Image (cartoon, rainbow, N blue to C red):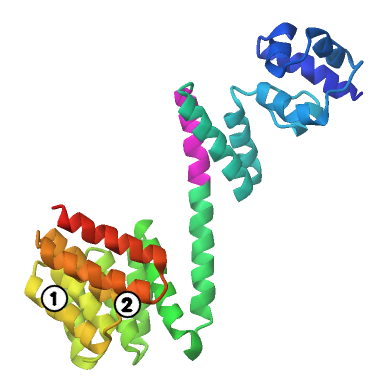
Amino acid sequence: MNRIFAKNLKTLRLSKKLTQEQVAESLCVSSQTISRWECGNGTPDVLMLPELAKLYCVTIDDLYKENSIAYENYAVRLACLYEYTRKPDDFMQADLEFRKLFKSGEYSDEDKRFYGIIHHYMMNYCKDKALQLFDEIIDNKSAEKEEVYYRAKGQKFGLLSDIGQNEKNIEEQYGLIMQGTNDAREYGLLIGAYYLAGQYQKAYEWYLKSVERFSEDASIFVWGGAVCKELKKYDEAFACWNNALKQNNQFCDAKYAMANCYEELGQYEKAYSVWVEIAESLADEGLEYESYQARDKAKNCLNR
């Protein structure tokens, strides 16, 4: 039997302040069996290794390493492993173990701190991964992928806004406009960049400029409606969204905006009608779960 393994079993047990009898009871074996393992005169079944590792708050690999130490609990050990590897799979294992720990009610503020740490690291990983994927789409724009290009660019704007990089959105999009693009939806995205930054008056000014030049683009009217709503120009907002639907009756962004605005204004019957319309449209497209969400929104309006 591995000498290091046997030594670790004893060292880890003592560091957790457990007797051989307590370990034996936990693993449903005899105390003599534990003694044999720690003396190197016996080998636990391979199926017993995960139980030993969890009991001593280490990984299975730790059982075979020199000078392994017992962590406060298994969740913290997995958090340290993820902190080292930064692999999403290791995050998922640590996250699951922490949720079990919190459900048990036996956790400390230090456990909360470690749980926060792994979410911090995973947040950065997710942010970087999302930006990478969006940029891959944006950098490979083509006529065949035009719609997904604009969707990806809008999502990238939203992500950068969430992490406080609104000025980067504005700078990049304004620069594109100044280069002389004739693409109406790029103008719409500039309106969106100002909107996400909370610069509603500036966004409204660009909406007026854009709609004068591109009077038949639905996306400009959708962003214009969002800006008008924030400026409490509600009649103008609904006029924008209706214009968007005239250009493209299937433009769900306009319908979602209308339904949400009706709810904010307390006009629940109107909101209900729009949510039902959205739900039916999504169902026709085979978007089952999206349809359920819209129907739930409609039901909530009925209950108000």
> Disc 1 on helix, strand or loop?
helix
The three-letter amino acid code for the residue at tag 2 is: Leu
From which residue to which does the magenta span run? 107-121
Rendered residue at 28%/71% (across/down): 278
Q: Quadrant of the N terminus?
A: top right
Residue 116 falls within the magenta-colored stretch = yes
Q: Quadrant of residue 196?
A: bottom left
1 or 2: mark nearer the eye:
1
> Disc 2 on helix, strand or loop?
helix
Between 117 and 59, the one lying in front of the other is 59
Q: Tell me the tag on residue 189.
A: 2
Count the labels in the image.
2
Rendered residue at 10%/61% (across/down): 265
Instruction: Give the residue pinned by disc 1.
Output: 238
Question: Is 265 displayed left or right of 103 in the figure?
Answer: left
Question: Is 161 displayed left or right of 240 in the figure?
Answer: right
Q: Quadrant of residue 264?
A: bottom left
For residue 13, above or below residue 163: above
Assign the magenta stretch its main secondary structure: helix
Question: Is 219 displayed left or right of 83 in the figure?
Answer: left
Question: Horizontal and vertical percent for residue 221?
Answer: 22, 81
Between 97 and 221, the one lying in front of the other is 97
Marks 2 and 1: in contact by CB < 8 Å?
no
Question: Is 1 displayed left or right of 215 in the figure?
Answer: right
